[in-house]
Image (spheres, rainbow, N blue to C red):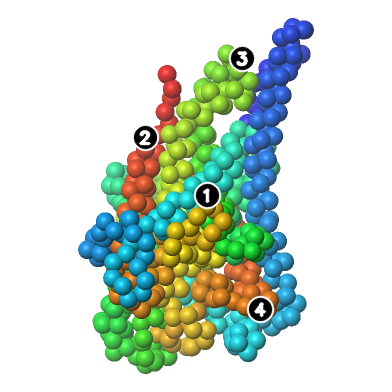
Amino acid sequence: MATTPVVNEGALPPGRAQSFVRRLQAGEELAYLVTATAAATIFLITALILYELFSQSAVSRHTLGWSFLFTSTWDPVAGNFGALPFIYGTVVTSVLALLIAIPLGVGAAIFLAEMAPMGISNALTFLIELLAAVPSVIYGLLGIFVLIPILQRSVVPALKSVLGGLPIFHGTFYGVSVFSAGIVLAVMIVPFIISVSREVLLSVPNDQREGSLALGSTKWQTTWKVVVPFASTGITGSIFLALARALGETMAVTMVIGNTPQIKASLLAPGNSIASVIASQFAEATGDLYVSSLIELGLVLFGVTFVLNGLARIMIMTTGRKGAH
Amino acid sequence: MNRSLKVRLFVNYLMLGLTGLCTLITLSALFFILGYLVAHGIGSLNWSFFTRLPAPVGEAGGGMANAIVGSGKALLLATLIGIPIGFLGGVYLAEYGNPAASFVIRYVTDLLNGVPSIIIGVVVWGLVVQRMGHFSTFAGGVALGIMMIPISVRSTEEFLHAVPHSLREAASALGAPKWKGLVTVVVPAAIRGIISGTMLDLARVAGETAPLLFTALGNQFWSNGWNEPTATLPVMIYTYAISAYDDWHRQAWAAGFVLLTVVLMVNIIARMTMARGIHIPR
């Protein structure tokens, strides 16, 4: 914003007036300095987070090396630390959540951006954004006491009777499971997909729609063959954002996943995720290697969400620009 | 386009109907959550919830007065840490930054916003708890404060950008240097939006649990000052929900109801204020 005219020093009368203006310009320097310091602080805090994770996980990184990421035994008592069960649990719950949330979220975003009248769309979006404001511990609470009983009573028996042959639905269902965690996550990330995708769809220029309609397409053909492809990069960005959120989600997952470090083909078996093992074991972890390996798990999670978020922002920005001219 | 018009229209209405169904399903989740918490929460809620300390295991009754105060203290500290940095950072982005620096800061802010909250907890544990040697309200406040920064930056920037340029020019034309124009004209014009943004920010971190697990920890009793571990509402919900006692489950529902009510009310008020847009002082 350097275009705003400032007082031109050269045109000033000498003497007292000039020193007064100098003082004000010193104020200007001060204002710049104070705000720039705050901005730099944000940068430093983010760098500090990375540095802390890196330095605090040194013991684990040096002792266990890369094999940490590919070892599937986690037994702190015996001193075995392998991250694989947690990486697996994180990936499986998030993928499951995306499988449910993408159709639901993109569908609703299409409805809100393309179909509903603006007033209704805004009102419904307002409500959906409230859903995004519900704290994750509340989702966990409902997951334990509402979702799991429903799954146990009707959903899982039904799934087993239809798809029971598939290995992913084998075994006894105890309630806490990778499956339950995936469903809770899906409910949690849908609002993000909807609100970002809707914004992206709304930024698609109208002449795209008009061009397609003029060729005789139906509303749906226009939406699916013209508007959605135009916005696809941005929608993918919204999905990446949601994925980053699902990967890092802690409380709701911890409360329903069962916290068992194992890799089972069945979704109905309990599991564990990176965020939830940190949440449930960090406070009572003893010994440098134990603490340090939990922090290394944090470093892995940080790295993955960092990259995903970075990509997502670029994708959403790109679509915004494409619609700008 | 060799399909008949009938088929195309059928697909049209079917798919458009399905998108409507998607919206309906998502929205029903909200009403389901609200309904369930109200039904379970109100029944478990009574006056002693707000005034009494948690009862020992096996004893009925008791409340979460210490957790309510603990959450309040941690949020106060978080605001004192997060909002000044966020606000000033937002002013920098909107008013002072050159394009390259602004791009970097904006990008980093978005990334900070995306850092999983459990990671913030671990980092603050390393920076504060480990150095001080004990869990504390202070550490909890720092963790929540860091989480508040990104939203504060972005909402400040957004609302400053929405202030019409003519107002800045008018201030400059009257001879006010840029900083004075900012302080007396531009920021006051955007203040309603900035305050709503701050409220949304507070509502978001008020429900955060993960960053408090190993910073504020928890406490069955009152926590004095800033240097003792403290109970907070979200952590209490977590601890009580995963416990094996029915009394504790009831308390968790009551706490969940209180937390959700506060968070949603603040959200609704803030969003409505925000929707009224920029206030131009006369």
Check disc 4 and give the amino acid type.
Answer: Gly
Residue A196 in percent (x, y) is at 45, 54
Front residue of this view, candidates B145 and A232: B145
Q: Which residue does the numbered mark 4 point to in the structure image?
A: A287
Mark 2 lies on residue: B276
Q: Are marks 4 and 1 in contact (CB under 8 Å)?
A: no
For label 1, the SS is helix
**Mark 2 against mark 4, which lies toward the viewer?**
4
Binning the other alpha carbons within 10 Å of mark 2 as few (below 14), some (14 to 19) or many (20 upward) gives few
Residue visible at 55% across and 79% down?
A86
Chain ID at mark 3: B
Asked if labels 4 and 2 touch by Cβ distance under 8 angstroms, the answer is no
Give the residue pinned by disc 1. Answer: B78
> Of the residues shown, which amino acid type is indicated by label 3?
Gly
Q: Nearer the viewer, mark 2 or mark 1?
A: 1
Q: Secondary structure at mark 2?
A: loop
> Percent from the top left, x then y, of residue A33?
69, 34
Q: Which residue is mark 3?
A: B175
- Residue A64, compared with residue B83, is above or below; it is below
